[in-house]
Image (tube, rainbow, N blue to C red):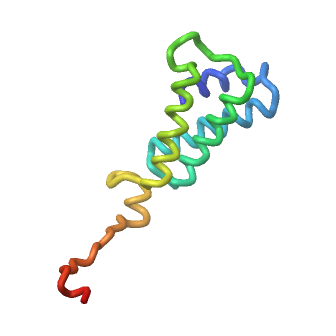
Amino acid sequence: MAGGITYLANWHERSFVTCAAVFLAVASSALVVIGLITPVASIMVAVSTIAAVLSSLPGSTGTLFDTKPLMVDVIVMSIALAFLGPGAFSLDARLFGRREIIIPNTSPSSKF
């Protein structure tokens, strides 16, 4: 998210498509951080990160956070978060309630 903000700081020097992709990345990252529409926002993070990996956007700084393995890690974590869903203290849990999975207790003798 911090890298995207540095790209948006110089938005007048970027093309419209680049600004739109960076804005999508920053907005979806912010939604994941606050826990609002977590599955959708996580997929948006994965898609925007894949787009950043495949595009020719130069890194904002020459740090470890601009490496391709870290981008792959972000993609994998965001897809896992999309499958897991929001946490207990997210806005999704406050707005829509927590979901509880109840596994019925069956004994082996009751199956026959």
Q: In which quarter of the view is residue 10 placed?
A: top right
| 77 shown above or below 14 | below
* Residue at x 56%, y 19% (from the top left corner): 67
Q: In which quarter of the view is residue 85 placed?
A: bottom left
Image check: 105 left or right of 18?
Answer: left
- Where's residue 73, x and y in %? 50, 32
| 37 shown above or below 29 | below
Which image quadrant: the C terminus? bottom left
* Residue at x 53%, y 25% (from the top left corner): 69
- Where's residue 89, x and y in %? 33, 52
Label total for image: 0
| 59 shown above or below 29 | above
* Residue at x 55%, y 31% (from the top left corner): 72
Q: In which quarter of the view is residue 9 placed?
A: top right
* Residue at x 20%, y 80% (from the top left corner): 108
In this view, the residue in front, 86 or 8, is 86
Image check: 58 left or right of 65?
Answer: right
Outermost residue, top side:
62
Which image quadrant: the N terminus? top right
